[in-house]
């Protein structure tokens, strides 16, 4: 049943740059007293002349009342965050962010810390980070962890640099081992980071099962294979049952295996990277570990590695000598610094609170509930004509890639237009697919462990109604959204780089054309 009271707020709020007027101010800065100026001089004299701006920056000139109303309206439009309604953005694991953990992270004991404080004055946060490393060791099976990477892609990139250092130490430079194997349904950072590291990327495509066969992997593996990086499960929610045979084949060729654990919500406490034959992994704390993201906060991408790879971890590492926690800079084989200071400490703190509150059994229950929710949603969506599961593998974990090609063929309405119409009914964005679109007209909802049976049923009812609209009133779906904060954008435009304005400066240039 659809809850008809849910609608997104729609203010058509202008950009903050388009508010206010020249000379308008939110606060009046106090003029520097003449006596002080005579002592300290002009602060700009301390800066090199070549880095000083020739013209002042173009900043919004807005008073406080108008500015407050602007951001209140924007916050009212964000009905798709975890506080209001379902947000089935697949591969992103948009779960509830416990507000008690926000209270912990907001306490001045953490927010007022400075990264350059003496170690003896930050023992509390160092202890939390050290113990969180222990959590990640237990979750992965590996012996060493770094919390330094600031996002998933940076975690993958760090692991890729470890592969390169490891192979070079073995005498296999880029002239001997220059290939990395991945799959098309792995996250886009999986092929991007080895390419940035100078490797040739071999991308394997699935067969009818939804994953590449063992034979495809073995055909791609050679003496030039430096390593492999894949998700298991990947973005289709399929767990490759042959994974141990595949990782063994890579090891036999002298390569290392990275597990992309962005989809850890599908196996918390039930499977570990080490036992599947992997040598290292990374997580997205802002996904599986329930910290705010998607416009609501930053990320973190810690990594874990097997014992002999620990010497390559980023510097510094957090260690404990039995009495105090300290930063260890004595890592001569380290790949170096990938992010300054402690890492994204606020994200790490929230993730620590989440794991601590759940415990081991709680983590297992997270996965049980996420898999149950996903398969209940599957049962409901499969009853809708034209909504089909991609690939023949029956068992799915945390999410499913769906195929709406039949609806498109019979109505001319594509999945992007359907997703926009789904938002009209008050739920958050539904993820289509990462590029390339191997599954035509895809959608990938991920209900996570957060949502109730009733919310999942409501989402399925919304999808059913939108599919019916595709056949009965397709023009309404094609011009959606109508009740959303986001206006209608022709879906072709979203893929045209000449029409996309990533910032206001580019937008202004487009307006002049």
Image (cartoon, helix red, strand yellow):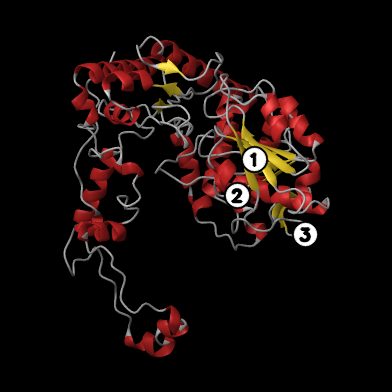
Mark 3 against mark 2, which lies toward the viewer? 2
Q: Marks 3 and 1, how far apart in space?
A: 22 Å
Instruction: State the image coordinates of residue 149 (x, y, percent, origin top left).
Output: 60, 49
Residue sitting at x 69%, y 35%: 220
> Which quadrant does the N terminus fall into?
top left
Q: Are marks 3 and 1 in contact (CB under 8 Å)?
A: no
Q: Quadrant of residue 430?
A: top left
Marks 1/2: CA distance? 31 Å
Pointer 3 residue? 330
| Residue assigned mark 1 | 132
- 200 relative position to 412: left or right: right
Q: Nearer the viewer, residue 98 or 175?
A: 175
Dot 2: few (<14), some (14–19), or many (≥20) neighbours within 10 Å? some
Q: Locate residue 111, reporting x and y percent.
A: 49, 52
Mark 1 lies on a secondary structure that is helix
With 80 as the anchor, is 89 left or right in this view? right
């Amino acid at each position: 049943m659809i809850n008809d009271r849910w609608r997104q707020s729609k203010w058509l709020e202008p950009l903050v740059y388009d508010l206010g007027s020249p000379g308008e101010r939110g606060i009046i800065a106090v003029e520097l007293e003449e006596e002080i100026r005579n002592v300290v001089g002009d602060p700009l004299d301390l800066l090199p002349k070549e880095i000083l701006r020739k013209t002042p920056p173009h900043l919004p000139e807005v008073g406080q009342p108008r500015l407050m109303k602007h951001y209140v309206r924007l916050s009212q439009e964000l009905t798709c965050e975890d506080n209001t309604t379902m947000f089935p953005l697949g591969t992103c694991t948009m779960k509830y962010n416990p507000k008690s953990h926000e209270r912990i992270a907001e306490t001045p004991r953490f927010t007022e810390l400075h990264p350059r404080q003496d170690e003896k004055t930050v023992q509390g946060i160092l202890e939390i980070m050290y113990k969180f490393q222990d959590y990640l060791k237990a979750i992965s099976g590996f012996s060493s962890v770094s919390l330094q990477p600031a996002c998933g892609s940076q975690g993958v990139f760090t692991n890729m640099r470890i592969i390169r250092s490891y192979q070079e130490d073995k005498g296999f430079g880029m002239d001997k081992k220059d290939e990395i194997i991945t799959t098309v349904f792995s996250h886009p950072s999986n092929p991007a980071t080895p390419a940035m590291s100078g490797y040739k990327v071999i991308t394997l495509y699935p067969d009818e099962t939804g994953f590449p066969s063992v034979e495809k992997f073995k055909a791609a593996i050679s003496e030039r294979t430096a390593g492999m990086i894949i998700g298991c499960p990947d973005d289709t929610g399929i767990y490759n049952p042959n994974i141990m045979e595949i990782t063994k084949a890579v090891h036999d060729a002298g390569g290392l295996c990275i597990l992309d654990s962005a989809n850890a919500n599908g196996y918390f406490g039930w499977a570990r990277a080490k036992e599947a034959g992997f040598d290292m992994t990374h997580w997205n704390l802002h996904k599986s570990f329930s910290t705010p993201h998607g416009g609501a906060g930053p990320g973190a991408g810690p990594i874990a590695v097997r014992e002999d790879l620990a010497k390559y971890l980023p510097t510094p590492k957090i260690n404990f000598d039995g009495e105090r926690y300290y930063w260890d800079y004595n890592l001569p084989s380290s790949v170096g610094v990938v992010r300054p200071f402690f890492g994204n400490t606020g994200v790490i703190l929230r993730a620590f609170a989440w794991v601590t509150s759940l415990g081991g059994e709680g983590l297992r229950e997270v996965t049980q509930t996420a898999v149950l929710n996903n398969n209940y949603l599957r049962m409901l969506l499969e009853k809708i004509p034209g909504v089909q599961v991609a690939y023949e593998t029956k068992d799915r974990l945390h999410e499913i890639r769906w195929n709406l090609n039949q609806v498109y063929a019979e109505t001319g309405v594509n999945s992007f237009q359907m997703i926009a119409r789904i938002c009209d009914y008050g739920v958050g964005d539904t993820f289509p697919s990462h590029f390339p679109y191997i599954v035509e007209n895809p959608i990938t909802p991920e209900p996570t462990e957060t949502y109730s049976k009733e919310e999942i049923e409501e989402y399925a009812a919304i999808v059913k109604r939108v599919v019916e609209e595709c056949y009965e009133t397709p023009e309404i779906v094609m011009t959606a959204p109508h009740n959303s904060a986001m206006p209608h954008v022709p879906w072709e435009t979203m893929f045209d780089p000449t029409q996309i304005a990533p910032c206001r400066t580019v937008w202004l240039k487009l307006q002049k054309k």
